[in-house]
Amino acid sequence: MSVQRVWKPVGSVNSNAEIERLRLELASFNKQIEQLEKQHPDAQKIEVLRASVLALTRQIDELRCSNANDLTDLLAK
């Protein structure tokens, strides 16, 4: 009986799902911003949404960097 090594993703499945969830939320914010800009170009809500978009993009970047670091650590072993 031979032993086969099974490669399992190290946290990447959960991270990928989280990234996809954040990307969907980001798309929703962008759509809301577009609609508000058409209705009220000077609305303060647009700035609030833009701040939320920036926070989401930072979270996506952090998750991607975390995945890259996990892969780097795994390859270093």
Image: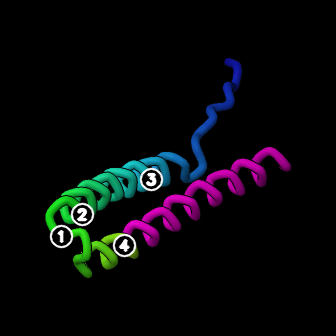
Asked if residue 30 lies left or right of residue 39, the reply is right
- In this figure, which residue is indicated by the disc labeled 3? 19
The picture quadrant where one finds residue 1 is top right
Which residue bears the numbered disc 1? 40
Q: Earlier in the sequence, mark 2 or mark 3?
A: 3
Please name the amino acid that badge 4 sits on. Answer: Ser
| Amino acid type at mark 1 | His
Q: Residue at x 37, y 70 (%)?
A: 50
Give the side of residue 62 with respect to residue 20, left or right.
right
Please, what is the three-letter code of the amino acid marked with disc 3? Ile
Tell which of 58 and 75 is nearer to you: 58
Query: Magenta part mainly helix, strand or loop?
Result: helix
Closest to the observer: 33 or 15?
33
Farthest residue in the bottom direction?
44
Magenta residues (range): 52-77
In x, y percent, where is residue 21?
Answer: 35, 53
What residue is drawn where x is 45% and y is 72%? 55
For the residues marked 1 and 2, what is the alpha-carbon distance in whole angstroms? 5 Å
Residue beneath label 4, please?
52
Instruction: Find out whether the residues at labels 1 and 2 contact each other: C-beta distance under 8 Å.
Output: yes
Query: In terms of secondary structure, where does tag 4 sit?
Result: helix
Q: Is residue 56 highlighted in magenta? A: yes
Residue at image mark 2: 37
